[in-house]
Amino acid sequence: MLQIKNLLDISAEVIADGCLENGAIVAANAFKDYYPMEAKNYFYVWPRDCSYVSIASDILGLQNIQENIFNWCLKRAESFYDTGLFFGKYYVNGLKAHNGFQPDQTGSVLFALWHHYQDNLEDAMEFEDLIKKGAEGLARSWNGKCFDLVATDLWEERLAFPDLAENFTYSLAACIRGLECASEMIPKESEKWREVAEEMRSRLDKHFIDGHFVRSYGKLIDRRIDASVLGLVYPFAICEPNDPRITSTVEEIERCLVVDGGVHRYEHDEYDGWMFEGMHRKKGAGAWPILNFWLSIYWAQRGDATRARKYFDWVFERSGRHLPEQIFDNDIQVSVSPLLWSHAMFVIASSFLRHK
């Protein structure tokens, strides 16, 4: 327990190190002395990562971080004020560093904003513009079956095309919950947002094929197992933990993606984030702590503390002072470390295990 408390304190420090004066939250602060030289530079802002950091900050009782990043998203993120959408990653000044449309990021920010103000939703009206623009942006870009723009998955490695009526499972879950949260925060303008959320739910139901939720669905189907489907349960609560569709999907995740206790993103993942003189090496991906913590959260919600602790402890026992993006089975590959999202998921998983 003392070790967990120490890591919770360290997580608060890592989060503080990633929060900049202009409100931005970087995925990893590469300018800190503890950051490994061989790791890829993650001094960028991903609104998705920021959303999980905001939730963790709520749990830790950290102040101002949430309001600062919400202001940054509204006033700094390039083109958001005009489109109501977030595109890929951003430089800390708000300019786009990656132009791909990632619908889950807008949904995630709306959810994080709701999470921060859930005890008094009237206070969320401080960010009425952010809520309206985000919800309208998602609703406007949705054509009843998919988004009108080419969409990128949360891993930034797959594209969904409108002419193929494609959607990513995790992305739809984030957008559904984000629109529902916006409707709770601004009920008087919620009819259209709820209609779109219901259309998305109907579409998401089609993603359950051959006994599990597939990675993406459309005229072409990516049937591979992807651990991000856990997002349907937490944080987006689209499905109950004991929904038979979820339990069978988790069985597939554990069968296909858990290797010696560590959870991998998807089948045949190659990304490792390891650099050599400006070149990105690809020698096979490791296990992702965020996913071990995600499975821990899932089993905690199912009431199985033993399995929840198994996935939680696997990371805890293999990490030092900081939690990396990936854990490898060798001492050659070098991961981004510390990753704020990893520390955020540690904080969230700890709260489900009653450590916070």
Image (cartoon, rainbow, N blue to C red):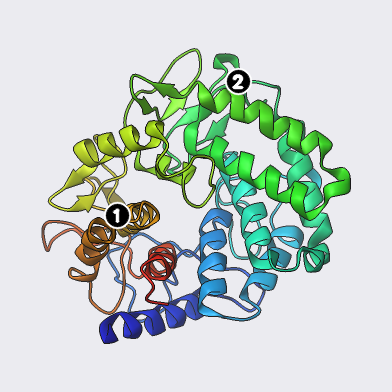
Give the numbered dot on residue 288. 1
User: What residue is rendered at 31% in x and 69% in y?
Assistant: 323
Asked where in the image residue 313 lies, by quadrant, the reply is bottom left
User: What residue is rendered at 68% in x and 59% in y?
Assistant: 114
Residue most extreme to the right: 188
> In the rendered view, would you say 88 is above or below 94?
above
> In the rendered view, would you say 311 is above or below 247?
below
User: What residue is rendered at 29% in x and 56% in y?
Assistant: 304
Towards the viewer: 337 or 208: 208
Task: Inspect the image, locate mark 1, and give the three-letter code of the amino acid beneath it.
Answer: Trp
Towards the viewer: 236 or 98: 236
Left or right position of 15 against 180: left
Asked where in the image residue 158 lies, by quadrant, the reply is top left
Residue 20, percent across and down? 59, 76
Residue 13, percent across and down? 44, 83
Q: What element carries label 1?
A: loop
Q: How far apart are marks 2 and 1 (CA)?
A: 30 Å
Q: Mark 2 points at which residue?
A: 162
Position of the N terminus by quadrant: bottom left
Give the numbered dot on residue 308. none
Q: Earlier in the sequence, mark 2 or mark 1?
A: 2
Residue 187, percent across and down? 83, 48
**Few, some or many residues within 10 Å of mark 2 (<14, 14–19, 20+):** some
